[in-house]
Amino acid sequence: MTTNIEKAKKEFLQTIDDFGADPYRLRNHVPEAEKWARRLLKDNPEADVEVVLLSVWLHDIGHYPVPTDIDHAVRGERRTKEFLEKIGYPKDKMDKVLHCIRSHRCKDVMPNTIEAKIIACVDSASHMTEPMYFDMARVDKENGSEFRAYAKMDRDFRDLEAFPEIQNELKEIYENWKKLIKSYEKLK
């Protein structure tokens, strides 16, 4: 029997396949976020495991296709709702997943449930434990544009605040990413 989480994973991966490319490297990012989620779920047994893991696999589904003028969290919320309705997911749990998707960026909607706080944290934590910032810096350098990685690192570090133990654990990595990007920026 296929679980809802397996269905979500398949839906997410199919979205990338349908686009034909993965410029945001989400095939790497989302499994890394899942590792962080499983860790936080162990420490937060009150969280709904299925809501968290569905949200992990669907939180970035709004990125593709690109380009888009719509925030990927907004588009992702809409796509996630369509997907969850299609598989007959219960409305009360659907609302929890949708909140996780919409608030994972801590931008215009803030996470207000334990599940949403986990998703915001694991999204940011996974950015720090994969090469995302370096990829951003490389693209900015090639384009001769301002390095966006610094602001992204700062936002990600801020978004770890709901779990101070994770923020503290990743502080050295955060500081070292800043040093690495600064050194890379100086290269001719």
Image (cartoon, rainbow, N blue to C red):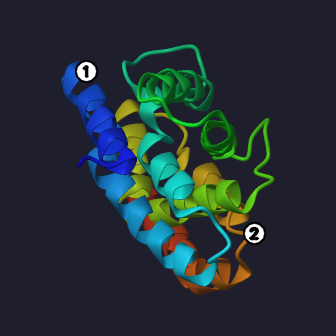
Mark 1 or 2, nearer chain start:
1
Choose between 26 and 76: the one closer to the eye: 76
Can residue 93 be seen here? yes
Residue that appears at 55% across and 73% down:
41
Residue that appears at 67% across and 67% down:
160
Find residue 59 and report its horizontal and vertical position in percent. Answer: 51, 42
Q: Amino acid at mark 1?
A: Phe
Q: Please, is residue 107 above or below residue 36 in the view?
A: above
- Locate residue 75 relative to residue 58 in the image: left or right: right
Kindly identify which residue carries mark 2.
162
- Locate residue 128 relative to residue 16 in the image: left or right: right
Find residue 74 and report its horizontal and vertical position in percent. Answer: 62, 25
Residue that appears at 26% across and 46% down:
2
Disc 1 on helix, strand or loop? helix
Disc 2 on helix, strand or loop? loop
Choose between 8 and 60: the one closer to the eye: 8
Residue that appears at 54% across and 67% down:
178
Find residue 88 and report its horizontal and vertical position in percent. Answer: 47, 29
Q: Amino acid at mark 2?
A: Ala
Kindly identify which residue carries mark 1.
19
In space, the residues marked 1 and 2 are separated at their CA atoms by: 34 Å
Can residue 25 be seen here? no
Circle 1 packing at 10 Å, graded few (<14), some (14-19), many (20+), is few
Q: Please, is residue 180 above or below residue 164 in the view?
A: above
**Quarter of image, res 133:** bottom left
Choose between 186 and 147: the one closer to the eye: 147
